[in-house]
Amino acid sequence: MNYFGVRDIDVVVVGAGQAGLSGAYHLRRSGLEPDRGFVVLDHAPRPGGAWQFRWPSLTYGKVHGMHALPGMELVAGPDDAGRPSSEVIGAYFTAYERRFGLRVHRPVEVHAVREGAGGRLRVETSEATWSARALINATGTWDRPFWPRYRGQESFRGRQLHTANYPGPEEFAGLRVVVVGGGASGTQHLMEIAPVAAATTWVTRRPPVFREGPFTEEWGREAVAMVEERVRQGLPPRSVVSVTGLAVTEAVARARATGVLDRLPMFDRITPTGVTWDDGRTVDADVILWATGFRPAIDHLAPLGLRERGGGVRIEGTRAVRDERVHLVGYGPSASTIGANRAGRAAVREIGRLLARTPGTEPAGGTAAGDEEEAAAVRV
C-alpha cells in the first residue's frame, strides 16, 4: 500500500556490499520478493560495495580473506590476480545481483530512519519514503573515514589525504611522505610508496603487533570474540585487525628488514613543513597520509536513539538491543566478508520470527525450493 507517497514494505536493506547482498539473498530464499517483500537501497553508483572505491594498485592478488557471497562462488580467472580488486569484485557483485534478481535501487541516499506509524519504521530516502516492519543496516564504514585532529594541522602547507582517497603510489614519486596508522592499510601504503618516494616515515599511536604464522581458525575466533564483547557493552566496535595484529607476509618481512616498517611514536603537532615531537625531533614532509581507519556509517539511525553511553550500538547477534526491528550486519564482529555472510543469514532468521508474530505476516512472494526451514520462520 502507498499512503501519501509512503511505500509499505516488509524489510528495507540499506547498503549493497557483502553484508547487504548476503541479507538480500537470504530474504529472497525466505520467501520475500524484491520490491514487494523487501527492497535494497544503495548509495553507490554501481555494484561492488566499498570495493569499487579501492585504489587501482590494490590488485585482486593482494586481497586477503575475500570470501564468496552465499550461493555463488567467486571464480577468479588466470589474469585476475593482477587486475584491480575493484574491477574483479565489482564484476562479481554485478553478476550476483543479476543472478538472484535482487533489483538494487541505486544511487539512493538514506537520510534518516525514524519511528513511523503503526509500529513501523519510517525510512526517508532520496528516492522515496518507505514504511518498513524491519531494517537490515549494512552501511559499513567506508563513508566515514576517521581524521584525527592535531595541533597545527591547518597550518600544514603540503597535502593531507586519507586511505579513502588514496590514489596509488605514483602520485608520491619524489615526495617526503608521513604515513599515520598501524593497520593493514598503513603498511600496504608504506610498502607501495617507499620505492618511489624521496622518504617515508611511519608513525602510530601504539607499537604495531606483528603476528607470525598462519591465521588459524582459533586465532580468528578469539579476535572476533574480543570485538563482539565491546559491541555487547555498547562500545564503538574496533576492527578485527586491531586485535589480530599484522600478519607477517613475505612482503611485510622484507619491508621490516629494509627499514620501511620502522615505526616512530605519534608526533605531537604538525608544522607548516612537517611534523614534530615534544622531545625536539622533527620530520619534513610534503604529504601526510592518514591511514587511520573508519567509523560505522550509522548517522541515519540517530533518530531511533540506538547508541549507548559508550558511544556504540549494543547488539545481540545482529539485533539492536534498543530496537528489535533493526539489525546491523557488517558491524563490529561481522565486519569481515565471512562474518557478513553469517550475519546476513542470522539477521533474516530473526526478522522472520519478528514478522511471524506481528500484524501482516504473510510473505509477499513465493518460497524458494529447498529452503523450507528458513521460509518457515516467515510463515509461522
Image: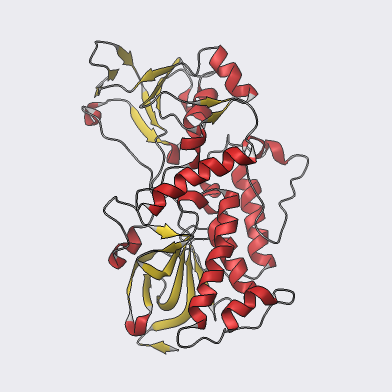
Viewer can see residue 295: yes
The front one of 227 and 279 is 227
Residue 352 vs 71, above or below: the answer is below
Residue 205 vs 333, above or below: the answer is above
Residue 291 x/y as whole percent:
42, 33
Quarter that holds the C terminus: bottom right
The front one of 167 and 163 is 163
Residue 272 x/y as whole percent:
24, 22
Q: In which quarter of the image is residue 158?
A: top left
- Residue drawn 43% across and 77% down? 132
Q: How many numbered marks have been drawn onto this rendered protein structure?
A: 0
The front one of 34 and 32 is 32
On the picture, is 69 further left or further right than 237?
Answer: right
Viewer can see residue 126: no
Quarter that holds the N terminus: bottom left
Residue 266 x/y as whole percent:
33, 23
- Residue drawn 37% across and 25% down? 287
On the picture, is 209 further left or further right than 85?
Answer: left
Residue 95 x/y as whole percent:
68, 60
The front one of 282 and 353 is 353
Residue 205 vs 97, above or below: the answer is above
Residue 324 vs 21, above or below: the answer is below
